[in-house]
């Protein structure tokens, strides 16, 4: 029985490889985004802890102005770090959007080849089925011819 051979199998494999490569690239960018988000959460946690410490322990009794000034400088520095992280996140988000588009484009190209493969397979299967039907018709015609010839001989013997 003949086997279906897709002429563009190499192209399909290449498209699948390209799609996986684009997915890996997107995963790298996503990991970078996750790292930046973790850093931002850590900064926010430090700010909340420091603020809670100042409110709970440093604002009662004698005020240490140098500590409060240092706390204010710390808050400004962490705010600056947060802003830098947010800017980096915006840049990485653009990269992530581009990577998603690249993955979607690669998937679209792969699906086009797969759809072509499916159509060619269906066409091959249909042609194969037609050939098999034609062969069966030929065999049945030959069988009916051979059996029909025997019936004529029997009829000729009975008439004589």
Image (cartoon, grey):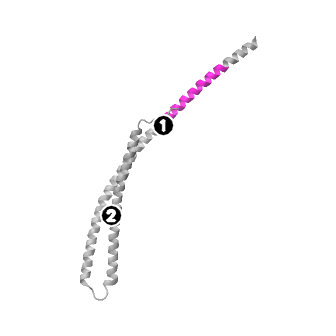
User: What is the x, y in percent for residue 156?
Assistant: 72, 13
| Residue 62 in the image: above or below residue 35 | below
Nearer-the-camera pick, 108 or 138: 138
Q: Residue at x 63, y 23 (%)?
A: 143
Inspect the magenta stretch and tell me whether residue 27 lies in it.
no
Label annotation for residue 102 = none
- Can you tell which mark lies on residue 121? 1
Classify residue 79 by image quadrant. bottom left
What secondary structure is found at the residue carrying circle 1? helix
Number of numbered discs visible in the structure rendering: 2
Q: Is residue 48 left or right of residue 77?
A: right
Across and down, in percent, residue 107 comes to 40, 47
Q: Quadrant of the C terminus?
A: top right
Q: Residues within 10 Å of mark 1 (few under 14, many from 20)?
A: some
Picture coordinates of residue 106, whole percent (x, y): 37, 47
Q: Residues within 10 Å of mark 2 (few under 14, many from 20)?
A: some
Q: Which residue is mark 2?
A: 36
In this picture, which residue range is highlighted in magenta? 121-147
Q: Kindly indicate the quadrant of the structure image that contains residue 31.
A: bottom left
Query: In the visual, does 146 lie left or right of 123?
Result: right
Prevalent SS, magenta region:
helix
| Residue drawn at x 38%, y 52% as measured from the top left | 23
**Looking at the rendering, which quadrant does residue 10 occupy?**
top left
Q: From the viewer's perspective, is residue 16 above or below residue 75?
A: above
Residue at the bottom extreme, as displayed:
61
- The kind of secondary structure element at disc 2 is helix
Disc 1 to disc 2, how far (Cα)?
48 Å
Q: Residue at x 33, y 67 (%)?
A: 40
Foreground pick, 42 / 106: 42
CB atoms of marks 1 and 2 within 8 Å: no
Residue shown at 43% from the left, 42% from the top:
114
Q: Where is residue 138 drawn, in percent x and y?
A: 58, 24
């Amino acid at each position: 029985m003949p086997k279906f051979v897709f002429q563009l199998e190499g192209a399909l494999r290449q498209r699948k490889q390209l799609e996986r490569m684009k997915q890996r690239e997107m995963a790298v960018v996503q990991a970078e985004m996750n790292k930046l988000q973790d850093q931002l959460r850590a900064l926010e946690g430090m700010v909340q802890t420091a603020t809670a410490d100042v409110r709970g322990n440093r604002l009662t009794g004698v005020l240490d102005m140098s500590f409060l000034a240092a706390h204010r400088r710390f808050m400004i520095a962490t705010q600056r770090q947060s802003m830098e992280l947010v800017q980096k996140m915006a840049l990485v988000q653009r990269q992530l959007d581009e990577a998603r588009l690249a993955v979607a484009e690669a998937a679209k190209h792969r699906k086009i080849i797969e759809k072509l493969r499916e159509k060619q397979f269906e066409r091959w299967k249909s042609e194969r089925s037609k050939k098999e039907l034609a062969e069966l018709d030929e065999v049945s015609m030959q069988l009916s011819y051979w059996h029909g010839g025997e019936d004529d001989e029997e009829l000729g013997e009975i008439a004589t």
